[in-house]
Image (spheres, rainbow, N blue to C red):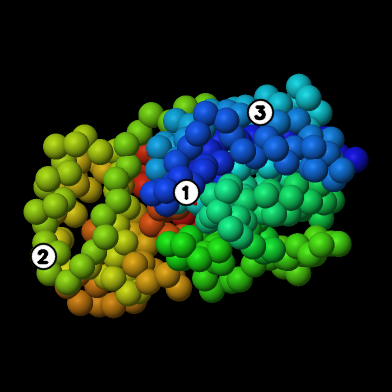
Amino acid sequence: MKNILIIHTGGTISMTEDKVTGTVKPENQNPLHNITSTLQSIANITVIELFHLPSPHITPKEMLLLKQEIDRRIVQDQIEGVVITHGTDTLEETAYFLDLTITKDVPVVLTGAMRSSNELGADGPYNLISAVKVASSDSAKGKGVLVVLNDEIHTAKNVTKTHTSNVATFQSPQYGPVGSVTKKSVTFHHAPIVRQTYHINEITKSVVMLKAYAGMDQSIFHAIQTLNVNGLVIEALGQGNLPPATIPGLKDLLKRNVPIVIVSRCFNGFVQDIYNYEGGGKQLKEIGVLFSNGLNGQKARIKLLIALEITNDPRMIQKMFLQ
Ligand code: ASP
């Protein structure tokens, strides 16, 4: 049996429903500890409880601590696979952070739940069992950080939370899952062809994100200058366009060496410098706006945070976003 490390970080999977009010919150004792003995029949399990946080409380600081703990344990305890339980709200951001920063080739799998531990149809224990099966599978090696819920295996890069409450919330728009989990097997039918990793030891920069809308103007771009931001991600319109009234604000930020990366607010497709009108992608590229490669906004933000620890050169940052 493989040596699998389970790291609990919190989230609904570790929460309990109040039977009177129907509200859900963390209790002192993590209910997931009750199923550790069941998991021992699949792998040699070590469990640590790193955090007990709802995932809206997770910040890049916790993501970095998680990465450092995983790096340390892989070496120190001969860990052959890692499973992380996490709240689903920001799970994709932590997953992508780890995908970009963990350089060791050990399966790392994140899972969570949409229903808390004592609700009818609780999906947490089942998802945790599936995640341990995937982390123990030889075929999970070399596929980057994976997200496993609802019998599906997704890559950290493509997966996103698509529904507020449905158990089938995690989807990979445009690509689909890379594999599936059944009672008896873990099967991969796709594999990512590239994986980028970066060595970082700290996160020191501030990157904010804005969503474009009809009628957006330059005022918000001037307002964020007072925040001393180091980078900006914009969920732009369609194929990568912005209202013309934003342009003076963008130029001002670029003059202050604040890299601006655009993604699309559409959840399928890529941004490109196609449209040749004021505010169109062609003009955005000409003034120095950087283009992402199909990542959603929250993941582009994670990538820019990491990129800025390595370089401030817009050409290098653009290269990192093209891969
Ligand atoms: N709000 C919860 C969290 O992200 C949702 C969940 O875990 O599913 O912590």
Q: Where is residue 202 in the image (x, y as percent from the top left)?
A: 47, 27
Q: What residue type is labelled 2?
A: Ala
Q: Can residue 256 be seen in this view?
A: yes
Q: Is residue 273 visible?
A: no
| Residue for point 20% across, 67% down | 213
Q: Where is residue 247 in the image (x, y as percent from the top left)?
A: 15, 61
Q: Which amino acid does label 3 sit on?
A: Ile
Disc 1 or disc 2, which is closer to the eye?
1
Q: Nearer the viewer, residue 13 or 250?
A: 13
Q: Nearer the N terminus, badge 1 or badge 2? A: 1
Q: Are marks 1 and 2 in contact (CB under 8 Å)?
A: no
**Alpha carbons under labels 3 and 2: distance apart:** 51 Å
Q: Nearer the N terminus, badge 3 or badge 2? A: 3
- Residue at mark 2: 245
Q: Which mark is residue 267?
A: none
The quarter of the displayed image where residue 85 is located: top right
Secondary structure under badge 1?
Answer: loop
- Residue at mark 1: 19
Q: How crowded is mark 1: few (under 14 residues within 10 Å), some or many (20 or more)?
A: few
- Residue found at the very far top of the displayed protein: 76
- Residue at mark 3: 48
